[in-house]
Amino acid sequence: MSEIKLAITGMTCGHCVRATAKALEGVPGVTKAEVTLTPGAAVIHGEADPTALIKAVREEGYEAEVRG
């Protein structure tokens, strides 16, 4: 199982974090998504396409980019 790290901007509260985590966990290949508000970041466990992860975050209204 691999790990993908995303930097996420635009989240302002716990609801944002939960919505983003749920969206990421809905992407095929994701087994778990850990999202934090400060700093705006996510660690995704599994074998998912980074482009699909970024798309899922953007559909929730936030911006994301792969870190590292």
Image (cartoon, grey):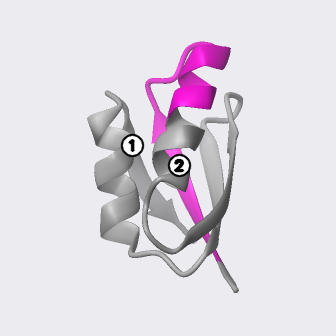
- Residue at 54% in and 22% down: 16
The first of marks 1 and 2 along the sequence is: 2
What range is drawn magenta here? 3-19
Quadrant for the C terminus in the image: bottom right
- Residue at 59% in and 16% down: 15
Judged from the image, the secondary structure of the residue bearing numbered disc 1 is helix
Q: Which numbered circle lies on residue 7?
A: 2
64 to 44, vertically: above or below: above
29 to 56, vertically: above or below: below
How dense is the environment of label 1, judged by Cα within 10 Å: few (below 14), some, or many (20 and up)?
many
Q: Nearer the viewer, residue 14 or 9?
A: 14
Q: Amino acid at mark 1?
A: Val
Residue 11, horizontal then vertical, whole percent: 51, 23
- Residue at 46% in and 63% down: 66
Q: Which numbered circle lies on residue 57?
A: 1
Q: Is residue 14 one of those drawn in magenta?
A: yes
How dense is the environment of label 2, judged by Cα within 10 Å: few (below 14), some, or many (20 and up)?
some
Quadrant for the N terminus in the image: bottom right
Q: Amino acid at mark 2?
A: Ala
Residue 54, horizontal then vertical, whole percent: 35, 55
